Image (cartoon, rainbow, N blue to C red):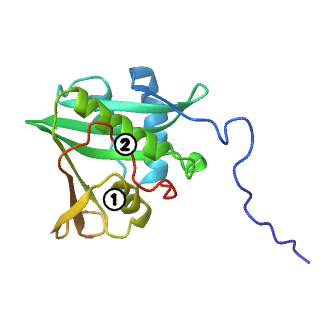
Amino acid sequence: MIPFFRRRAPSGPSSGAKARIERAKPADLEAIYRIERRSFPTPWSYGALRDEVTGLRPYSHVLVARVEAQVVGYVIFWVAAEEIHIVNIAVDPDFRRRGIGRQLLAAALHEARQMKLTRATLEVRPSNAPAIRLYESFGFQTVALRRGYYSDTGEDAYIMWLNPIPEEPTPQQEDQEE
């Protein structure tokens, strides 16, 4: 008889640890690329991520989440006019459901407020229910549908806005995890 193994909840020293959020450094690029490949069906290229992390694009900002010394997630956002555009957010699959995505999003929105930016936007796949719940918990609202946005599957994208960004961006529903 083959034993049935249930996936256990994360355990160990970093299972409940809060991540430390900080600006990405070029040395973080390999970890960011690894997370990107594990998180998306059509990942960004190494070169595109390098351009974001190394500051080649002056409007781009990249934050990473660290648990102990390990990069376990990142967020990339662009600054344009009086808004931020969150273009990519990902958490290593081994570290999901620990609130790290929530921390990354809160940190990006906090930086936006520090820069005196007033609103935020992003696109998300309608099939990505956990991400939609996360964004909605911060007050993002779906305002439009962009048909055929994702070239890998032809899937549409919801366009979501947060306007205005609150003074202290925090989720409204603590029980929703990304």
> What secondary structure is marked by label 2?
helix
Q: Nearer the viewer, residue 8 or 36?
A: 8
The amino acid beneath tag 2 is Leu
**Residue 130: quadrant of the picture:** bottom left
**Residue 104: quadrant of the picture:** top left
Vertical side of 151 occupied by 19: above or below? above
Name the residue tied to disc 2.
105
**Residue 146: quadrant of the picture:** bottom left
x then y, percent, for residue 13: 72, 35
Residue at point 24%, 61% (across, down): 141
Crowding at dot 2, Cα within 10 Å, few <14 / some 14-19 / many 20+, comes out as many
Name the residue tied to disc 1.
136
x then y, percent, for residue 96: 55, 50
Please state, as top left, top right, bottom left or bottom right, where the N terminus lies in the image: bottom right
Residue at point 40%, 56% (across, down): 134
Residue at point 31%, 69% (across, down): 126
The amino acid beneath tag 1 is Glu
> What secondary structure is marked by label 1?
helix
The mark that comes first in sequence, 1 or 2, is 2
